[in-house]
Amino acid sequence: AFTLAASAILSSVASAALVAWYPLDEGSGTVVADASGNGNTMTAAGGGTWSGTGAFGGSYHVGPNGGVVARTGVFGSLSGINATTGNDVTIAFWAKADAESMGGSVFYISDSTSAAGNRIFQSHLEWTNGLTYFDTDWTSGTSRVSGDVGSVSDVMHHYAFTYDGDSGAMAVWKDGVPTLTGTGDVKASLPWA
């Protein structure tokens, strides 16, 4: 299980277009409100619990079955997101795992046709083998960057997962330092819908 706080999905630094920001301060329920003003709500899943303690206020303690879920069926405008992001995406959040090498997803974003199977972005922070995984484009062959990012359970860390669909460049940043990099599939358009 993980504690998540202050999550955001945004574009590349070059375009600086915020798509969604989740303070995770709801305190109850399964609806995760978007504070960016864009109306991109998410669904909290995995049997988690809310807390008033996080990096910047509230947090969501993710249950053992998965993380906060964003589905494009809920993200009504994401099918046109490429015009906003320039085909670059950064998913950033604060997180602290309950223990090392637990397994489970800290986040996944799936298309509107699947509860979980057609994942566009997904992260395991860490898997049972001690590695952190960042996957993109689950539906047509997964691109993946993986490796050891150090301790995920000592304190709350800031993570940023970046993907450039034009070059395929993928990276995982931890506390402002690039810890994993690689190249995945080049996609002319991110498959949001």
Image (tube, rainbow, N blue to C red):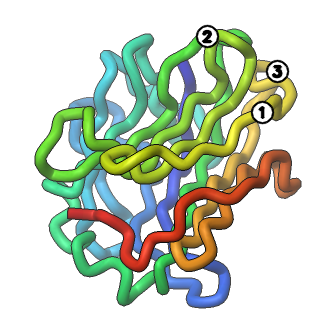
Mark 3 or mark 2: whose residue is earlier in sequence: 2
Position of 130 compared to 133: left or right? right
Q: Are marks 3 and 2 in contact (CB under 8 Å)?
A: no
Look at the picture and state if 40 lies above or below 106.
below
User: Which residue is painted at 63% across and 34% down in the image?
Assistant: 133
Q: Nearer the viewer, mark 1 or mark 2?
A: 1
Coordinates of residue 192 in the picture (x, y in percent): 28, 64
Q: Nearer the viewer, mark 3 or mark 1?
A: 1
User: Contact (CB < 8 A) between labels 3 and 1?
Assistant: no
- Residue for point 57% across, 89% down: 15
In which quarter of the view is residue 4 placed?
top right
Question: SS class of the residue under badge 3?
Answer: loop
Kindly identify the amino acid type of the residue bearing the numbered disc 3.
Asp
22 left or right of 119? right
- Tell me which label, 1 or 2, sits earlier in the chain: 2
Q: How many marks?
A: 3
Q: Residues within 10 Å of mark 3 (few under 14, many from 20)?
A: few
Q: Report helix, strand or loop for mark 1.
A: strand
Alpha carbons under labels 1 and 2: distance apart: 15 Å
Q: Mark 3 or mark 2, which is nearer to you? A: 2
Q: Which residue is mark 3?
A: 154
Q: Relative to 159, does residue 59 appear above or below in the rendering?
A: above
Name the one closer to the observer, 107 or 154.
Answer: 107
Q: Quarter holding the C terminus?
A: bottom left
Q: Which mark is residue 147?
A: 1
Q: Which residue is mark 2?
A: 102
Q: Residues within 10 Å of mark 1 (few under 14, many from 20)?
A: some
**Residue 87 placement (x, y as % from top left):** 47, 78
Task: In the rendered structure, find residue 86 and report the number of the disc placed on it.
Answer: none
Amino acid type, mark 1: Gly
In the displayed structure, does residue 167 sit left or right of residue 11? Answer: right
